[in-house]
């Protein structure tokens, strides 16, 4: 157990639907990151939050949105789902947001596997 | 923007040594990280280099040359359990400090 909790572990839904993925960071970590990993692909950065504020944005689709709440958990909302959105979505957390080893040691959750049919 | 290049696949036998190279392009380099991911699993942190030189952690070592925008991960005394994908990653202060991962190198260890 890495300390980063993601729910649900698996999700099967239909095109056009909307889903919410949830992440609780490791205790003490203020930064939360979301990554998308399609089959046999690398990790595509979506978005990063630090202590409730958005800090960095990747190539996140307009159909996707995220937020980090005061208790530091984060949610990734995916709407108008398409077949190509099927992927593993990882949440990760780190101690801080910028330089130093702490910011570069990301602890990943087990991922949420989304299948869009 | 950022870009990272690493080989897609490497095959070696148990007990051998494997070097995974990573070249990167960033405009505000912080450091180079390495992560391991087994099939179906989550990435796990292996090492981080902010300064030039070699960092050794058990059978794994990581090297960085900032002037060459190059680093490598060295896997020694390969074991079957080392079969996994290995990702290099850089944080770019000019890109909002996001941590960008390379495409990954799949290492296959054969008996």
Image (cartoon, helix red, strand yellow):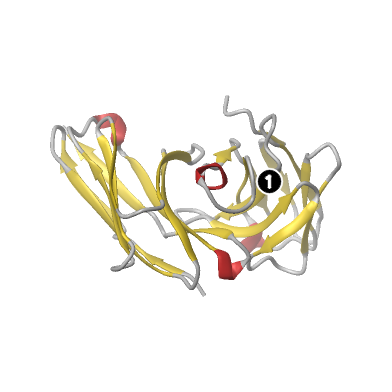
The chain holding disc 1 is A
Side of B103 where B57 appears, left or right: left
Give B60 or A75, whichever is nearer the viewer: B60
> Alpha-carbon neighbours of circle 1 within 10 Å: few (<14), some, or many (≥20)?
many
The image shows residue A11 at horizontal and vertical percentages of 70, 42
Circle 1: element type: strand
Give B64 or A45, whichever is nearer the viewer: B64
Residue B61 at least partly seen:
yes
Where on the picture, by quarter, is residue B76?
A: top left
Side of B52 where A52 appears, left or right: right
The image shows residue B111 at horizontal and vertical percentages of 15, 32
Where on the picture, by quarter, is residue B12?
A: top left
Q: Is residue A20 above or below residue B13?
A: below
Where on the picture, by quarter, is residue B104?
A: bottom left
Q: Is residue A27 above or below residue B8?
A: above
Residue A67 at least partly seen:
no
Who's the residue at 16% across and 33% down the image?
Answer: B14
The residue positioned farthest toward the top in the image shown: A1
Q: Which residue is mark 1?
A: A31
The image shows residue A64 at horizontal and vertical percentages of 76, 61
How many numbered marks does the figure carry? Answer: 1
Give B19 or B57, whichever is nearer the viewer: B57
The image shows residue B78 at horizontal and vertical percentages of 20, 34
Q: Is residue B105 above or below residue B41?
A: below
Side of B94 where B32 appears, left or right: left
Give B33 or B49, whichever is nearer the viewer: B49
Who's the residue at 86% across and 41% down the image?
Answer: A70
């Amino acid at each position: 157990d890495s300390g980063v909790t993601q729910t649900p572990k698996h999700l099967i839904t239909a095109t056009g639907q909307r889903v919410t993925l949830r992440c609780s960071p490791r205790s003490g970590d203020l930064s939360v990151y979301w990554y998308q990993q399609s089959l046999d692909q690398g990790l595509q950065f979506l978005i990063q939050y630090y202590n409730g504020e958005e800090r960095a944005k990747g190539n996140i689709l307009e159909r996707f949105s995220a937020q980090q709440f005061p208790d530091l958990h984060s949610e990734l909302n995916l709407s108008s789902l398409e077949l190509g959105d099927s992927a593993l979505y990882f949440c990760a957390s780190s101690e801080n947001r910028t330089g130093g080893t702490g910011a570069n040691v990301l602890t990943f959750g087990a991922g949420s596997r989304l299948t869009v049919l | 923007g950022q870009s990272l290049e690493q080989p897609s696949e490497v095959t070696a036998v148990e007990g051998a040594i494997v070097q995974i190279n990573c070249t990167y392009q960033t405009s505000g380099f912080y450091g180079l990280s390495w992560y391991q991911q087994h099939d179906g699993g989550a990435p796990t942190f292996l090492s981080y280099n902010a300064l030039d030189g070699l960092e050794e952690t058990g059978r794994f070592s990581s090297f960085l040359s900032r002037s060459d925008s190059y680093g490598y991960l060295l896997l020694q005394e390969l074991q079957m359990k080392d079969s996994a994908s290995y990702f290099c990653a850089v944080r770019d202060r000019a890109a909002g400090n996001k941590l960008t991962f390379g495409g990954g190198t799949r290492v296959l260890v054969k008996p």
